[in-house]
Image (cartoon, helix red, strand yellow):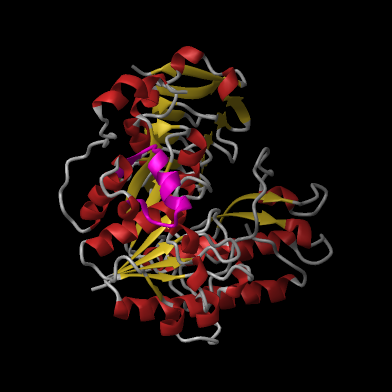
Amino acid sequence: MLRPEAPVDGWLAELDAQVLRSPGFLASKPAVVDLGGVTAEDADLAGLVRGLQGRGLRIIAVEGADPSWTGAAEWGAAIPGGRPTGPVEMPEAAAEPPPAPIEPAGLIVEEPVRSGQSIIYPKGDVTVIGSVASGAEVFAGGSVHVYGTLRGRVVAGFNGNSKARVFCRRLEAELVAIDGVYRTADDMDATLRGRAVQAWLEGGSIVMTALD
Amino acid sequence: MAKVLVVTSGKGGVGKTTSAAALGAALAQSGQKVVVVDFDVGLRNLDLVMGAERRVVFDLVNVIQGDAKLAQALIRDKRVETLWLLPASQTRDKDALTPEGVARVVAELREKFDWVICDSPAGIERGAQLAMRHADQAVVVTNPEVSSVRDSDRIIGLLDSRTELAERGERMEKHLLLTRYETARANRGEMLKTEDVLEILSIPLLGIIPESQEVLRASNIGSPVTLSNPLSAPARAYFDAARRLRGETVPMTVPEEKRGFVQRLFGRRVA
């Protein structure tokens, strides 16, 4: 996303300086140009588009342009239904972009989760090798897997993931919640107590079935 | 190499002080040099249970605040000469304990004794956390009922996070001491069974202390049960637990009272 500002000549010079500092930053990148920062009076828009293309940019769309502006047609039509995004962050001078750290696929808890403890992991699944005690909590952005007895509270998909599920080897839970929908022990099918169970969200309510 | 052992539970009234005194005495009776430290500042009981309440001059708070030397506050047991008591202060509260002061006193006790047994106050606050802070091992005292078990679970979580060992990334050795256990009631489902408690807490079992009149009697006469009646069922259970603490392998049993023939005839009809 590029957002030219008036005066356009000065902005192009700044862009050139940036490209000099980090070569390859703009090369052949598809760019969306936001013209909300300039007006037809500021510059010759057809000149601006040639200026950008001359710098190796691939302009795929434009937004914020008034169709009545001279040369607006040359920019092509706005892309409908795009998601709002922030401006491209310019890298610091001479800084190589650091390699993205490899994110763990999930959190594995090798100890029992004790009463009073909270495990909060927004990035993905939580796998507990031991039990989750009465009075303990596990919050996961993804699914929750408990290989021991689930006695405490689990909240799966707590940041809006309705596909998240809860699995446990033995259900004695106080509360199971998925994406804001919850079920307390009293409302769980009594025949599922003490059994291996999975829970997921269907039609806005929690469905629980035995796994064994 | 001295071992610092905290006796803790979370819940009150489950037998921490009784167990600290009985285990301490049992270890001392086997020749080990033992000090039992009362961390329950403001609600001290260990002096009573060990029969030393009339001999307290200086206490833990005095030593921590520099008003007395450690040697002045330590009380030697009159029955077992390798058993010592460091009493708590009754007139102060837990805020009188400072982390630095506790660290200094525990370090000093490590030099002098084989075992430093810290009798923790109930709860999970400052007093309990300071009592467990410098421990190498923990004895978690639990009754076979749900609220005690859940509180013990909470305390185990603190042992794994708020102690020096845990902060260094090491594991604290934890032992479960199941107290006030009645086999018959557990079998009738009126109490949690040993395996239920072990399944929930998942720490190794140090011993099962049967419910017994002897424990109350021992407290009232100011003597650890291993001294007042060494042949009683709870005393034998504490002796076994103390041997396990020293690394011996002892088969796990629930000792029962030995009854005379006449007692066996009539014993069951009472109450």
Boundaries of the magenta span: B207-225
Residue B189, located in which quarter of the rendered image?
Answer: top left
Question: In what quadrant of the picture does the N terminus of chain A appear?
Answer: bottom right
* Residue B59 is covered by the magenta coloring: no
> Which residue extends farthest front?
B262
Q: Residue at x 23, y 37 (%)?
A: B253
Q: Nearer the viewer, residue A173 or B254?
A: B254
* Residue B222 is covered by the magenta coloring: yes
Q: How far from the left and from the top, in percent, is residue A21?
A: 51, 78
Question: In what quadrant of the picture does the C terminus of chain A appear?
Answer: top left
Please say if A36 is above or below B202. Answer: below
Please say if B246 is above or below A168. Answer: below
Q: Nearer the viewer, residue B197 or A58?
A: B197
Q: Is residue A205 left or right of residue B198?
A: right
Q: How far from the left and from the top, in percent, is residue A146?
A: 39, 34
Q: How far from the left and from the top, in percent, is residue A53?
A: 57, 61
Q: Is residue A102 visible?
A: no
> Which residue extends farthest top?
A191
Q: Residue at x 40, y 24 (%)?
A: B185
Q: How far from the left and from the top, in percent, is residue A103?
A: 40, 53
Q: Residue at x 35, y 69 (%)?
A: B78
Q: Is residue A155 visible?
A: yes
Please say if B74 is above or below A179. Answer: below
Please say if A64 is above or below B191. Answer: below
Q: How many marks?
A: 0
